[in-house]
Each structure stands twice: as C-alpha cells, then as structure tokens.
Amino acid sequence: MRIICGILLAIISCLPLLHCSMFEDIELYSGMDVENIGVDIYLATTPPNNLYISTDKGQSFSQKPLVNGNYLFWAVNKNNALLTAEGDAGNNTHIILYPPDSAWVEKGYFPTSSSVLALTEGPGGEFYLGVNENDSRTLYILQPGASAIQPVNITGFTFSISNIWAIVLNGVTNIYIADSGALYRSTDGGMSFTNVQNFGYSIDDMVQFHNEIYFVAGGSIYKSSDGNTFGQISGLSGVHSLCAFTDRIFAASATQIYFSFDGNTWLAGTNIGDLIGVDYTGRLYIAEGPSVSLYASDDGGVSSYLIQHPGFSPTAIRVVSYRK
C-alpha cells in the first residue's frame, strides 16, 4: 500500500487548486529500508494544464498522459492514486481515476451545464469535488474502491467554491470550503456547512501541524486549535504556500522560505521560494515557477541547492512518499 505525504499546493490544482504536500503517517515508515520507500513529485503547469511526474526525486520529469489531454483540476490521495477533472471537446467534464498500478477508470461525468469548481483528497484516501449544478453547489465524494462519485449533500448550498480541504482535527474530519474571502466548515462529512469567518482575501493553502490548522489568506498565516476560531500570526507577509513535516511547518513567499517549530515563532531560511512540498525524510522541495527551477533543502529549509531546470514553469507541486 502506498502512502502519500499529504498539498496543493494546490493546485493548486489551485490556479486550479494549489497543492503542496502535508506529511502524515510518518510512523508507517519507521524501521523500513529506504529501498522500500519511493518519492514521486508532481508538478503542474497552467496553461497549458499539463502534469509532470518525477520518480527519481526531481532528477527527471515525464509528462503524465491524460485521457482528454489536459486537466481542469487534480489531486493525489494517500494511496498514490491520481484523480482528475478533465474537459472534452464538447465542454463536458469527465472524472478520471489513475490508480498507481492499473489502467485509468472513469468515475463520473458532468454535462456542459455543470462545472467542477474544486477538487481535493481526504485523509482516508477519499476525494471531494465541489460542483456547480443549475446554480446550486453540490459536494461529491469518491470513496476508495467505489465505482463512481456520489453526492454528499443532495440539496446543495448557495455559496460558491474556490477551494476545498479535508483535515482531521481531534479525531474529526473537518471539510473546509473557501468562497473568495469566506471560509465554511463541515464536521458531519459535508452534509452541512457553517460560516467560520470572512477574511476578505482569497484563501490559498491549508495544512495541519501539531493538531492545529494553518491557512494562508492575503499573504498572512492564520491558525486554529479548534478548527473554528482562527487568529492571525504576526510578522509574516507575502506567504502563499504551506507544508508541514513532523518537527516543523514551512511557509513560502515568492522569494523566501520560513519555518517554525511551534507555529508561533518563525525563522527566515533560504531565499529561494514559491511552491513547496516535503517528503518522508523531511527534504523540502521548492518549485520556483518564474525561473523554471526545482530546488531542494536537506537542512529544514535553512539552505537550498538546485536540482535542475525542468524545462517548464510549474504552478503547483505535490510530493508523494509511498511504500514500494
């Protein structure tokens, strides 16, 4: 079974969703030989909306062949399965699952009258999709092993969807939906949502670290210990990407990496920034889109070194650690 360090950045596929990697389940790697652990790095471009994958820790990349050529949104779950929303020539949307070791399977279809607004992976290997149907927004879920996506909230909701995250906090899966500067939260699997707060800025990224939730809005970082009340962390600005390892949380601006051991006191690291993800060893990967460069840091973000110039300008990153 493959395990993912759980971005994106989205993408990432915010963008479409901005994905980064948010590491989880590190204890599953304890005692394993490094030969039995792999690291895949996903880089996305937009436009054109192409996906590239490296299986050798960034030394080389190959383009991921997609059924319809390009993605609208994408996400990778903890089982290293890729789910995409892809448009065809008739402006219909196909939901395609690419398992790590078998052929692709179509898991859903939306006609041109509907549109996928966001896509993310969940902590249990599930996927969540926000869909606009007849001016009502519906949350869909694809459970591991399910034959097709299923609507969660049949009645839908009226606020829009620009991003989705699903994070476990205190044993409960919290599903967050960002609608421009507003943040909505569900603790009942997406059946109902309540407004957390209106921040006035788009919410770009969200991760969990030490049983607290962190997100970026308007270049600032906010955090919460209960998942409902968020406070702004002072002293940082221009941040747009987050990821977390076991002992530190990382933040990136366009030109700087910051890191913190407690989420309160932040230190400036390497002056290479942009999009970030971390693998099971704690190696930080930095995709710098404007210079078309991929860097890495092996000392917790203090310094960095160039891996390569991949030949395309990335707009999102996802780092996956898995059992071979």
Image: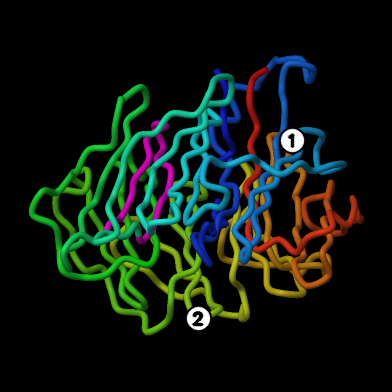
How would you classify the magenta stretch by its main secondary structure?
Answer: strand
- The residue positioned 64% from the left and 49% from the top of the image is 51
Task: Read off the residue under disc 2.
Answer: 218
Query: For the magenta stretch, what is the residue range?
Result: 117-131
Residue 118 magenta-drawn?
yes
Q: What residue is shown at x 53% (from left), y 77% (from top)? A: 220
Colour mode? Answer: rainbow
Residue 79: image location, x then y, percent: 51, 27
Determine whether 310 is above or below 280 in the image: below
Quick one: 263 or 316, which is closer to the camera? 316
Contact check, label 1 and label 2, Cβ < 8 Å: no
Looking at the image, residue 177 sits to the left or right of residue 26; the answer is left
Looking at the rendered structure, the secondary structure element under dot 1 is: loop
What amino acid type is highlighted by mark number 2?
Answer: Gly
Membership of 110 in magenta stretch: no
Task: Please report whichever mark, 1 or 2, sits nearer to the chain's N-terminal start.
Answer: 2
Residue situated in front as seen by the camera: 126 or 224? 126
Question: Split into 4 quadrants, where in the image is the N terminus?
Answer: top right
Left or right of 178 in this view: 289? right
Q: Quadrant of residue 256?
A: bottom right
The x and y percentages for residue 83 are 47, 40
CA gap between label 1 and label 2 equals: 31 Å
Query: Would you call the spot at circle 2 few (<14 residues within 10 Å), some (14-19), or many (20 or more)?
Result: some
Residue 107 percent coordinates (x, y): 35, 34
Residue at left offset 44%, top offset 64%: 223
**Looking at the rendering, in which quadrant would you find the C terminus?**
top right
Q: Is residue 19 above or below residue 97?
A: below
Q: Which residue is mark 1?
A: 281
Q: Which residue is painted at 28% across and 37% down in the image?
A: 149
Secondary element type, mark 2? loop
The amino acid type, in three-letter code, at marker 1 is Thr
